[in-house]
Image: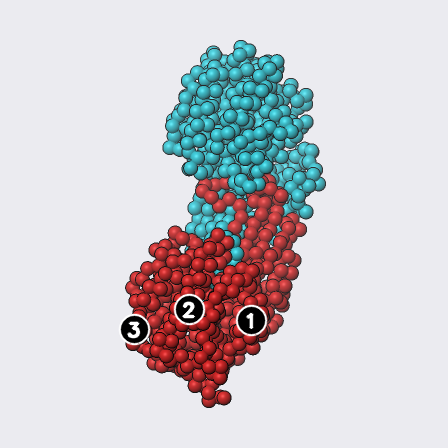
Chain colours: A red, B cyan
């Protein structure tokens, strides 16, 4: 199979670049047409690769691409999940090349979605083509590729509930996470959940002259800043009552195990040009961004933000505030705690509205499962060393939903790197990583089928 | 003269509307052409009204309109100052009619600049025309109308320094302030100064995924909020060390005198739809917005502010922060204290840049001066009652500059109202106020000339 993959490398890359040229931004309705084009492109490629039933399922939002290949009902079935929608690309001016005009530079593919998740999803399409061409597909496969992951997979749950039989599988595999390094393969065994809110603080009923009114009325921007500041104490603990009540506390052994993963604080600070790191007292950087919950402002705006100086007191100020959750916290519970607390800390001189966006549940995937074992063996085959199990700070909310709706475990076999700048300007994906993924996936199928046969 | 003014009312208004149609926004370079058009329009009208030497003086920024009428060097000279530039009109969507398509509704002129300061400046042009037509000009007059007041009069000082002889006068009159009410005439005897800064907080060197990095790096928005929040204590006192050292403390008598000015807290809260007022402990609303210094955020921005939810940690966050100053504070001193303090409270995990914008000095104009006395008598003639002397919270930085450069006092005889919504959507100016101004100004000239003759 390696030979086939090597021979077709240029075409595989060319096809991915074509997909990356489609600005399928799900957060902005003005890209709706491109979103559908990206879905159609994947449907065509799956059919061309030999999949059956390749089709788009319409939802209340963006379509879901489905395709399958059932070679023998007695064999196990792998369900591949991915997403073809991407994050907004702004600020555009910080990109070295336009986000939707992909280029390959220094063996890296630069484009919005290069890694998250078009690049990683397309590895599966090409791995499938390879197995079909080489007649080495060892089990059944189903594809479910959605277009709303970056906006909270708002319509996926409905689709899954209504298509349980169609989606029946023995394992779900997702490549939407990263590895520690190209020479330190890893498999993600845990994900943080998410609670996301937009808040609006209203002071006076209109913008006011800061000279005539300054000092006498509540300035909604100053108030919003005070409210946000109060959400962390001096040790950077989150002050929302009850926020930590259900947080999973890791044992000293587990923390020691985590600490063994290779990590250089200096390299980390250098890469981000940080004079110092910043976070919750009593936890390491690796712990802060994986096993601990967080609260971050993702956006803030209010008043005059244009050129020059305008002496105005704004009527309203806004912020987008999200919390990352860890096992045993639920997004619903935390969202309620946040909303209640945020409204309670508003002074009587302002009005506050809290609008919850989507949420997601934290998950931990067992390293004992056949799925994890198959992924670990496949990576050992292609990387020459056993992968390290790691907790990731990111969220893939649908993993918890798959478990509850389909009663199926998920294995998170990702090939990206932290340095890929996903969600940032100049997002990229290594050609090495893209090709390694295409090589590793068929081996995962083989190991999974073999383990399944043993256990049967 | 009253008859002439009444007969020409419609034309006076029509000419003002024509001036208001020109979007002379000085804060935004893209309006540069309109700024020059507005200056040219005033130059023409002054010449048409009978002024000599009507011309535009070029500066490093926007032109200054100058004109004069010297009828007898032995008579006193009044220098009229005004500005033809206006504040930005955004947010446009909150205007009931387009800001640069003036309409008269319910006896009010609606447009950006209707009051501040095109309407109030144009009263002087039409009052001058009236005195010329009626041959009742009792003294010499000079006009200096600038186009950069809303951006800090950055080039006016240079012009004044270079034209001291040309600008020599016995009194400067400015109509760029308000009255307490149409039946409670007042003259402004004090103004607050201004110190205005733009701050930039930088965390990581690029936008980051809030899942992978959240909790482990300083979020510049959260940090900026904490820094801004710390600038006021729980009593809403400003915490910048030394900030209050030179603040003029009014005597109990002076505060009691101020408290006699008609003011209804309920009406104030109702007008702004405030559930409660908010400000410095130990001072009344009227004191908070006039005799006390303030610190307000005029604008804030950072991260993702678009539609939907983006899970990003921004690299940078920004705010525009201004302070209103009271007598004995200087903008330079306060700007230094602010910059030093703001940089000092930044945690080591971020970088902070403070960029000072323009500043302005607070002033108090003596009620004993001939200028104030002439204004008081003129208003008593037209309003039928003595005006109340009031301290205004706003800033007209150039008043202090005129005093130091030209050694000339200024009288602040304004005809606007707090409810005119200057700097806000739906700015307006009462037709009553516009006409009252045109009636009152010639009487000011007469009283000033008479007082001058007595004192001579």
Q: Closer to the N terminus: mark 2 or mark 3?
A: 3
Can residue B264 be seen here? The reply is yes
Disc 1 chain ID: A
- Per the model, the C-alpha gap separating discs 3 and 1 is 37 Å
Identify the residue shown where x is 62% and y is 31%.
B417
Disc 3 on helix, strand or loop? helix
Residue B432 at what x, y percent from top left?
63, 24
Q: Closer to the N terminus: mark 2 or mark 1?
A: 2
Is disc 1 on the same chain as disc 2? yes
Identify the residue shown where x is 55% and y is 15%.
B130
Disc 2 target residue: A47
Circle 3 crowding by C-alpha within 10 Å: few under 14, some 14–19, many from 20: few
Disc 2 on helix, strand or loop? helix
In this picture, is B278 found above or below B59? below
Identify the residue shown where x is 46% and y is 24%.
B41
In this picture, is B265 found above or below A3? above
Residue A158 at what x, y percent from top left?
58, 66
Disc 3 target residue: A6
Number of the label disc, if any, that sits on residue B103: none
Nearer mark to the viewer, of 2 and 1? 2
Disc 3 chain ID: A
Disc 1 target residue: A163
- Per the model, the C-alpha gap separating discs 2 and 3 is 22 Å
């Amino acid at each position: 199979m390696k030979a086939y993959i090597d021979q077709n490398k240029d075409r595989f890359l060319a096809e991915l670049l074509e997909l990356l040229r489609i600005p399928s931004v799900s957060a902005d309705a003005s890209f709706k047409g491109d979103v559908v084009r990206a879905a159609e492109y994947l449907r065509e490629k799956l059919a061309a690769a030999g999949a059956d039933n390749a089709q788009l399922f319409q939802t209340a939002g963006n379509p879901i691409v489905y395709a399958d290949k059932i070679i023998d009902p007695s064999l196990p079935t792998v369900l591949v999940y991915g997403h073809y929608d991407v994050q907004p690309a702004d600020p555009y001016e910080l990109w070295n090349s336009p986000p939707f005009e992909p280029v390959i530079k220094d063996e890296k593919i630069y484009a919005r979605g290069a890694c998250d998740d078009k690049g990683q999803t397309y590895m599966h399409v090409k791995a499938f083509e390879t197995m079909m061409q080489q007649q080495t597909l060892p089990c059944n496969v189903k594809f479910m590729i959605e277009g709303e992951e970056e906006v909270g997979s708002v319509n996926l749950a409905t689709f899954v509930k209504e298509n349980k039989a169609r989606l029946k599988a023995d394992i779900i595999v997702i490549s939407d996470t990263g590895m520690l390094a190209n020479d330190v393969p890893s498999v993600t065994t845990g994900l943080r959940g998410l609670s996301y809110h937009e808040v609006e603080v209203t002071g006076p009923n209109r913008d006011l002259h800061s000279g005539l009114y300054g000092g006498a009325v509540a300035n909604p921007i100053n108030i919003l800043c005070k409210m946000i500041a109060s959400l962390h104490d001096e040790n950077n603990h989150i002050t929302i009552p009850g926020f930590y009540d259900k947080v999973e506390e890791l044992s000293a052994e587990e923390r020691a195990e985590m600490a063994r993963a290779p990590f250089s604080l200096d390299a980390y600070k250098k890469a981000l040009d940080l004079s110092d790191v910043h976070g919750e007292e009593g936890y390491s950087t690796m712990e802060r961004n994986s096993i601990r919950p967080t609260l971050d402002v993702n956006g803030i705006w209010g008043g005059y933000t244009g050129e020059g100086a305008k002496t105005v007191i704004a009527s309203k100020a806004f912020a987008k505030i999200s919390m990352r959750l860890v096992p045993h916290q639920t997004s619903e519970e935390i969202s309620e705690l946040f909303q209640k607390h945020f409204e309670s800390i508003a002074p009587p001189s302002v009005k506050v509205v809290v609008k919850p966006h989507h949420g997601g549940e934290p998950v931990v995937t067992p390293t004992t499962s056949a799925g994890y074992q198959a992924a670990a063996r496949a990576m050992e085959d292609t990387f020459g060393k056993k992968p390290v199990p790691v907790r990731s700070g990111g969220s893939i909310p649908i993993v918890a939903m798959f478990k509850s709706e389909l009663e199926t475990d998920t294995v998170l076999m990702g090939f990206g790197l932290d340095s890929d700048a996903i969600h940032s300007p100049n997002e990229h994906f290594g050609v090495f990583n893209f090709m390694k993924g295409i090589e590793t996936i068929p081996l995962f199928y083989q190991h999974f089928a073999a383990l399944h046969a043993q256990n049967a």
